[in-house]
Image (cartoon, helix red, strand yellow):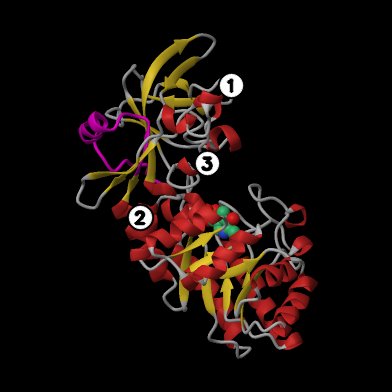
Amino acid sequence: MTEKKVPFTLEQIKEVIKQYPTPFHIYDEKAIRINVRNFLKAFNWASFKEYFAVKATPNPSILKILKEEGCGTDCSSLPELIMSEKVGITGENIMFSSNETPAKEYLKAKELGAIINLDDISHIPFLEKHCGIPEIISFRYNPGPLRKGNPIIGDPVESKYGYTRPQIFEGFKLVRDKGAKRFGLHSFVISNELNRASYVETAYMLFQLAVDLKNEIGIRLEFINLSGGIGIPYSPEQTAVDLFVLSEEVKQGYEQLIVENGLHPLKIFSECGRMITGPYGYLVSTALHKKDIYKQYIGLDANMANLMRPAFYGAYHHITVMGKENAPHDRVYDVVGSLCENNDKFAIDRKLPAIDVGDILVIHDAGAHGFSMGFNYNGKLRSAELLLKEDGSVELIRRAETIEDYFATLDFSKL
Ligand SMILES: *Cc1c(COP(=O)(O)O)cnc(C)c1O
């Protein structure tokens, strides 16, 4: 079970709304810092580093907070690389885990000194041709039929990512011949997974592969990248992954496979996104309309373009009606946005307190893959992003889009 709380009161958020109209995303700095510290502490037995998956929450103020806590970034596009650079995250503090990558993105990654994590064996000659083989290189492994995925990421056999097992061996021999000296291994086969065992299984799989690479072709890995995919309890019925137990289980695998086989020290990396910021971001909106037809609807000023997970994945996101936290939840509503798409619903048949027009609704767990998945369909503009700072003050960390932004790529003078 997870208690769903909001880090501000009705009065506090009303003050914020006076300055920044709804809808907006707001992130809780203090909670993010505590969470990351906890994560790093859990893995402090290892030479461990978290590369925050920028795609989850691509905002420089968030990246700066994570940098201060000792994280690097996991990037997969040129703008993500440049955002990291602008925040001062460079060199081996960047993991470039891209796929279907254009040459200019590899060039930028190389220029920044990032660790390049190649998605395919055919990218070895591609990389060589465009920027040379770097001294440090990592490969993404797809275990195919050897592993089951999970409902979000799907079956590895159906996944476009990574090298097959034989290609991992062939690839490392190839890059070694071409001068690479430092090697890493990555795999990402689960997503939003609350079952610790799946993540631990990935660790064992990669540790075993590290042993096989040493024994069969004499490649000694410098790091294993367990990637992201740790889930969060979107629903109050779910429970967060216990990071200390998870770490203890990974440690057992490390001792059994890595230490026993003389491969210690081996660095351990992660590329979590969702689990780092997800629970600490909230989409704040106002009820604009109430509609009573075959069902009861609450129409918000936010919509699927601000947070697509409910409409796209049917995902549950908890909703708090501010000031009515303790009122009886004796109404059943569909809480909807304004897109001309009938799936633009934040909640279907949700038990909530009686809602009035003007009430402030807070949608939970929007801190990762929330704002960042936003889009402009139907001429909807992206919202602002705010930071609730440790001292309780609120800072605008991205202004809301304007109609001028929306029109910026058009030239009406040519009509
Ligand atoms: C999306 C992604 C992540 C982060 O996943 P989370 O589910 O947010 O932890 C990490 N690595 C890669 C390569 C990704 O594509």
Label 1 belongs to which residue?
Answer: 342
**Kind of residue at badge 2:** Ile
Looking at the picture, tell me which residue is in the foreground, 70 or 378. 378
Q: Give the secondary structure at mark 2.
A: helix
Residue 72 in percent (x, y) is at 45, 66
Q: Is residue 21 magenta?
A: yes
Residue flagged by tag 3: what amino acid is it? Met
What's the magenta region? 1-26
Q: Which residue reaches farthest top?
A: 293
Mark 2 vs mark 3: give the one in front: 3
- 123 and 331: which one is in front? 123
Q: Position of residue 61 (x, y in %)?
A: 35, 53
Residue 95 lies left or right of residue 24; in this view the side is right
Q: Earlier in the sequence, mark 3 or mark 1?
A: 1
The amino acid at mark 1 is Asn
> Residue at the spot x=55%, y=56% of the render?
78
**Quadrant holding the C terminus:** top right
How far apart marks 2 and 3 lie (CA) works out to 20 Å
Tell which circle, 2 or 1, labels the residue nearer the N-terminal end: 2
Residue 316 lies in the magenta-colored region:
no
How far apart are the two marked residues, 3 and 1, measured between alpha carbons? 19 Å
Q: Judge the density around disc 2: few (<14), some (14-19), many (≥20) Cα neighbours within 10 Å.
A: many
Give residue 231's position: percent from left, percent from top: 52, 53
Q: Is mark 3 within 8 Å of ligand 1?
A: no
Q: Nearer the viewer, residue 41 or 104?
A: 104
Ligand 1 sits in which quadrant? bottom right
Q: Quadrant of residue 140?
A: bottom right
Identify the disc placed on residue 32: 2
Q: Which residue is mark 3?
A: 373
Tag 2 near tag 1, CB within 8 Å: no
Q: Is residue 172 above or below residue 362?
A: below
Task: Give percent across and percent down for residue 217.
Answer: 75, 86
